[in-house]
Every structure is written in structure tokens, then in C-alpha cells.
Image: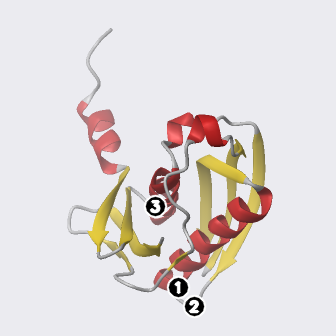
Amino acid sequence: MPPPSPSSEAAARAAGWEHFPHGADVGVRGFGLTKAEAFEQAALALTAVLTPPEEVRPVETVEIQASGPDDEILLVQWLNALIYEMATRGMLFGAYHVMIERGRLSATATGEAVDIARHEPAVEVKGATLTAVKVEQTPDGRWLAQCVLDV
């Protein structure tokens, strides 16, 4: 198998997520080539607070909508909509597809019912907050979407 091309390597490095420490809570960051991709990655970081996203099977897809007057509020609304859907449906999501247009987010979240024995949820996420919220395009052209989760 030939090595990946430099452009595909750069694309793979452009998308991703991470956690950052914040007192008793946890911060989530998503990175992507587009704002929508950064929001998807932030959602994966949210899932990873609970269980490894790759452990969540793609059994059911749920449509989710969110809106906000600016990108930061939209990010918090998006993550809170996911937290609500997970709690009320008893599900975890491991894959996301986001579209953002004029302050409105339309998305699908794909996952399965929580299996305590298999998923071993680490904590309960109470909500996304405005603490350390940031949505911006970085100097290297990638998008960053971050906030702190109340756990």
C-alpha cells in the first residue's frame, strides 16, 4: 500500500478532538478544516467524556437542530442538544454529520442505546457551558470549537 499523499496526511491532522482540564469540569475541543467539522469533532470529544466513541455502534440515527445568534452560542446549543438527546433517549452517539448555515445547525447523530456493561460511562455530563467557549479559524486555516462541560 503506498504511503498517504501529503494532502491526505494534512487533512487527517486537521480534524480531531481533545480534552483540556478545567477544575472539576472538563473542556472539549474540536478541530476541522471547516466550522462544521470542528463542531462534529467537539461532539466526539463530548462522547469521549462518557465512553470511547469507537465503541459506539451505528444502530440508530437521530436528527438534531440548534440555533444561536453567534458561533459560540451555537456550539453550546449544539452540545446541549446532544446531551439532551442522549439523556432522554438513553443513547450514546459515536458519529456526527453537521451542516451550519446562517446561525442554524442541522445534524445527524448516529449511535446506540447505552449498554452500561460495554460502554462503562465514566461520568454524567450535565451540560455545555459558556466557560472558555471559542469558535474561530486559526492562523493555519483550521477551525477550532471549544467549551467546558459541567460534569
- CB atoms at circles 1 and 3 under 8 Å apart? no
Q: Residue at (28%, 44%) from the top-left corner?
A: 13
Badge 1 is on which residue? 73
Residue type at numbered disc 1: Ile
x, y (%) of residue 125?
54, 67
Along the polypeptide, which appears first: circle 3 or circle 2? Answer: 3
Quick check: 73 above or below 15? Answer: below
- The 10 Å Cα crowd at callout 1, few under 14, some 14 to 19, many 20 or more, is some
> For the residue labelled by badge 1, is the local secondary structure a helix, a strand or a loop?
helix
Q: In which quarter of the image is residue 77?
A: bottom right
Which is nearer the eye, 115 or 1? 115
Badge 2 is on which residue? 69
- CB atoms at circles 3 and 2 under 8 Å apart? no
Which is nearer the eye, 36 or 86? 86
Q: Residue at (52%, 43%) from the top-left corner?
A: 53
Which label sits on residue 42? 3
| Disc 1 to disc 3, C-alpha distance | 14 Å
Which label sits on residue 58? none
